[in-house]
Image (tube, rainbow, N blue to C red):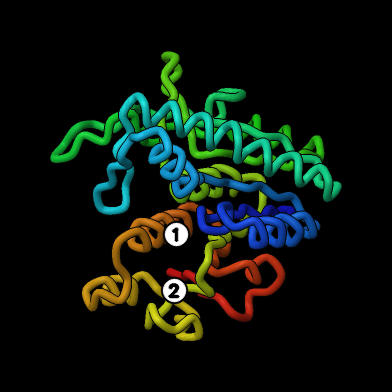
Amino acid sequence: MKTKLTIVKVGGVILDDNLLFEEFLKNFSLINENKIIVHGGGIIASNYMIRLGIIPKMVNGRRITDSKTLDIAVMTYAGLINKKIVSKLQKLNCNSIGLSGADGNLIKSKIRKVNKIDYGFVGDIEKINDEFLFSLLNSNLTPTICSLTHDKKGQLLNTNADTIASEIAIAMSKYYNVTLKYCFDKSGVLMDQNSNTSIKKNITKKEFKKLVDDKIIYEGMIPKLENCFHALENGVNKIYIGDLDILNTIKHCTKITL
């Protein structure tokens, strides 16, 4: 029987709020089984860009990443945020190791092809080095993975953290019984964006399509849920979306099912 692995993708609002950030890490450190954090930090990166006089460019919730934007993403994601998480987890006796996709050849990507939109230095994942992650977990380390990958030609690429979490969950499902949790500032997928109690407790693939058509689910939540269904179809056991409480209980969140 496979042992358990919990993979948590943490959202940028939590990373940017000191109180939420501290509570998240405390709750995460208390997870007893093998665990992995995946993070981005787009809000923090955008704030630094504005300070430097660079206007963040987004299309349909996706960041356009030119060379200057990539430099700031590397500094904030792999530097500031990643090492903050690792150091605070050490304080909580959770022995973490901070990684980008280039470290240990963890996540190889290819630069996104230009179709209607040129996203710049954005990566689409080709391969996860699951053996490397497995060895880290077997050494009682907790990987903390930022949303940067590489093309094995010396180029770092900005890559969606939700997608990284999904692909890592799929890759690790051959070793573990994997639960994937998307932790952000809402209590789940909401039927009414103005009411944090209007949680949709369960969403199937069929219901998802209708909710998109009815414009209840829109913008960034669409690719997040697409990643969820992709993961479930490829070996991931359970997926939940919710706020900080999702690390302690699954009573008040959204479960994604096929």
Q: Which image quarter is the C terminus in?
A: bottom left
The quadrant in which residue 81 appears is top right
- Which element type, helix, strand or loop, lies under badge 2? loop
- Residue reaching furthest left? 116
Q: Three-letter amino acid code at disc 2?
A: Val
Q: Which image quarter is the N terminus in?
A: bottom right
Look at the picture and state if 152 lies above or below 9.
above
Q: Is residue 76 left or right of residue 233?
A: right
Q: Residue at x 26, y 53 (%)?
A: 60
Q: Is residue 34 left or right of residue 11?
A: right
Instruction: Please say whether residue 147 is visible from this viewpoint.
Output: yes
The residue tagged 1 is 228
Q: Is residue 47 left or right of residue 124?
A: right
Measured in 3D between alpha carbons, the distance from the residue under mark 1 to the one under mark 2, in whole angstroms, is: 13 Å
The quadrant in which residue 242 appears is bottom right
Q: Foreground residue, 96 or 230? A: 96
Look at the picture and state if 35 lies above or below 179.
above
The residue tagged 2 is 189
Q: Foreground residue, 81 or 158? A: 81
Q: Three-letter amino acid code at disc 1?
A: Cys
Residue 101 picture location, percent across and down: 53, 30
Mark in the foreground, 1 or 2:
2
Look at the picture and state if 213 lies above or below 247.
below
Look at the picture and state if 30 lies above or below 51.
below
Q: Residue at x 40, y 33 (%)?
A: 52
Q: Residue at x 67, y 61 (%)?
A: 19
How many C-alpha atoms fall within 10 Å of the one at disc 2: few (<14), some, or many (≥20)?
many
How many C-alpha atoms fall within 10 Å of the one at disc 1: few (<14), some, or many (≥20)?
many
Comes first in the chain, label 1 or label 2: 2
